[in-house]
Image: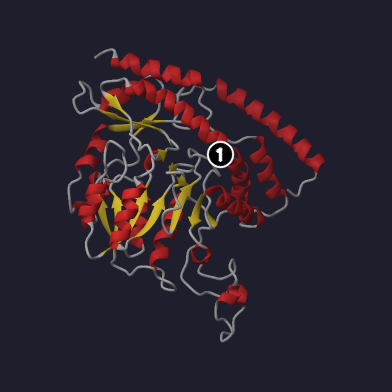
Amino acid sequence: MTLNNESTRKLTGAIELLLESSSRINEAKPRRYWYPLSLASYGVEEIVEALDSLCSFRTTMWEKTLQFERQFASYQDCSDGVMVNSGSSADLLLCFLLTNPYHPLLSNGDEILIPVVTWPTQIWSAMMAGLKVRFVDVDPKTLNIDIDDLEKKITPATKAIFLVHLMGNPCDMDRIMAIAKAHNLLIIEDCCEALGAEWDGIKVGNFGVAASYSFFFSHHMTTMEGGMIACSNQEVAEQLKILRAHGWVRNVDPTNYDLNNYDIDSRYAFVNWGFNVRPTDVQASFGLHQLQKLPQFNQRRIELANKFFKFIDAELYLSRPKSSPKASPSWFALPLLVSLDAPFSRKEITNYLELKGVETRPIVAGNIAKHPVAKIFAEFNEDTYVGADIVHQQGFYLGLSPFHSDEDIVKLIDCIQGFLKRY
């Protein structure tokens, strides 16, 4: 923080007044949803920190980004953190890490296994990086990758698995790690919905080469837009930093690279291909304070989810994802499946909830092979996916925020009961 104590005190007071005024104005506006998918989780501290960056003209990736990366790595119990401008960019760099020409871990055309229920940028990232995507079905009981189908899909060309811990529910890492070891497969993890989740006491994201995280507005913590990659070692982090910024060595130790035989300015030395997916210090300003609040946020999410799931577990026609005794979920949302034998459809219950002011949405993209994009790529039409079809047809989710109240959950339960009483 470059602002002095007096400036910070005055700025804090002004922002508090502004937020109070804004809250009163927003409360007076008509709202479609009394129970939305997400609520704002930031406040005065984040805004003051961001304004400090703006007022000091240190807005691009700078010292606060480095500080946030270090603190995130400490929280995650990993070697390094590499911040980027979104979770999707984190997925993109993960895949290009595998196939980059300077230090490739895989070859173009190698197969990578990806669950067919996931956010599609994970799939596009692998395709763009030159990998052959092979889809794996999901288990509707957990929403995660179907491990039996995973084993069946492995071929001599299979070299990697891109896992997703969907909705914050950890995958069965004991079985997956055993399969990966038996077949010499690399693992990368998408933890965008699973920040803080653990498998057998180990945070997800620490089981493979690296893992992606999202700090979008609705996620466990937010930098508005933003993401992070948790790295297993410093070499991985260095390669990701080069990929993050144009392919140059400005953000790493240039002495690790042979530049002596080139008539170039070392600040503008390019050693690999790359993108520009750098974050800003304004985003990192949010991250520094949000990370401090994350344990409290996650604990509150778990409390509210457990309260809601206790109700769901007693219902005949609705179910929620099951977790292994070894798993400690970090619930991203409140996912539900309508039973196949239910006397109502998913659309009927979601339409009812929407009319009652409860926002709903599909479970990520459902079965991505059911989308129009499947017409473009042959990979989408190589198999049928029974579990994913169930999630696609029967699944939806409701919001979960640490700023939802106990009364909100009680009212939400009452609303769902009002629908179920019809049957």
Q: Residue furthest bottom?
A: 261
Point 50% across, 20% down: residue: 406
Q: Quadrant of the C terminus?
A: top left
Point 45% across, 41% down: residue: 197
* In the image, residue 343 above or below residue 9: above
Q: Residues within 10 Å of mark 1 (few under 14, many from 20)?
A: some
Q: Percent position (x, y) of residue 341?
A: 18, 25
Say whether residue 260 is left or right of residue 232. right
Count of numbered labels shown in the rendering? 1
Of the pair 160 and 396, the residue shown nearer to us: 160
- Residue linked to disc 1: 294
> In this rendering, does residue 302 appear at all?
yes
Point 31% across, 38% down: residue: 142
Q: Percent position (x, y) of residue 414?
A: 39, 15
Q: Quadrant of residue 60?
A: bottom right
Of the pair 139 and 193, the residue shown nearer to us: 139
User: Which three-letter amino acid code belongs to the residue tagged 1?
Assistant: Leu
> In this rendering, does residue 123 appear at all?
no
Q: Quadrant of residue 387?
A: top left
Say whether residue 282 is left or right of residue 197. right
Point 43% across, 35% down: residue: 331
